Image (spheres, grey):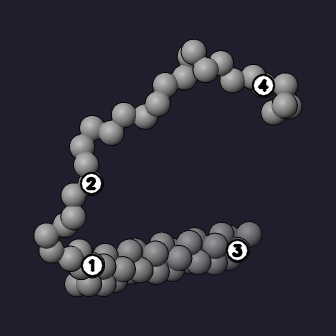
Amino acid sequence: MLKAYTLDDTQTSVVVVDEAAEVPTAPIKPKKTMIVAVGIVLGGMLGIFVALVRIAIRARKKAL
């Protein structure tokens, strides 16, 4: 399938670089406290969701 495809050089163009790459002035550090806080919040939300689903499943089994 790829061999059947022909590339037309008149319709293609070369990439143009707008600016040169810049070296950062300070190293990039991960925000550890934010990562931990988001992990705790998302983990808590996931835990509550799982608990609610288990309660709903148990209630449905009792109703049957």
Q: Is residue 16 above or below residue 32?
A: above
Element carrying mark 3: helix
In front here: 28 or 7?
7
At label 1, which amino acid type do we have? Pro
Q: In this view, does 19 lie above or below 38?
A: above
The image quadrant of residue 64 is bottom right
- Which residue in the structure is indicated by mark 2? 21
- Which residue in the structure is indicated by mark 3? 61
At label 2, which amino acid type do we have? Ala
Q: Where is residue 8 in the image (x, y as percent from the top left)?
A: 65, 18
Residue at the spot 70% in from the left edge and 74% down from the top edge: 61
At label 3, which amino acid type do we have? Lys
Q: How far apart are marks 1 and 4 (CA)?
A: 45 Å
Q: Distance between the residues labelled 4 and 3?
A: 59 Å
Q: Choose mark 2 or mark 3, whichever is in front.
A: 2
Q: Residues within 10 Å of mark 4 (few under 14, many from 20)?
A: few
Q: For residue 12, which numbered disc appears in the image?
A: none
Earlier residue among tags 2 and 3? 2
Q: Position of residue 1 (x, y in %)?
A: 86, 31
Q: How many labels does the image show?
A: 4
In front here: 32 or 53?
32
Is 47 situated left or right of 20 in this image? right
Q: Do the residues labelled 2 and 3 touch (CB within 8 Å)?
A: no
- Which residue in the structure is indicated by mark 4? 5
Element carrying mark 1: loop
Q: Is residue 18 above or below residue 61?
A: above
In front here: 26 or 52?
26
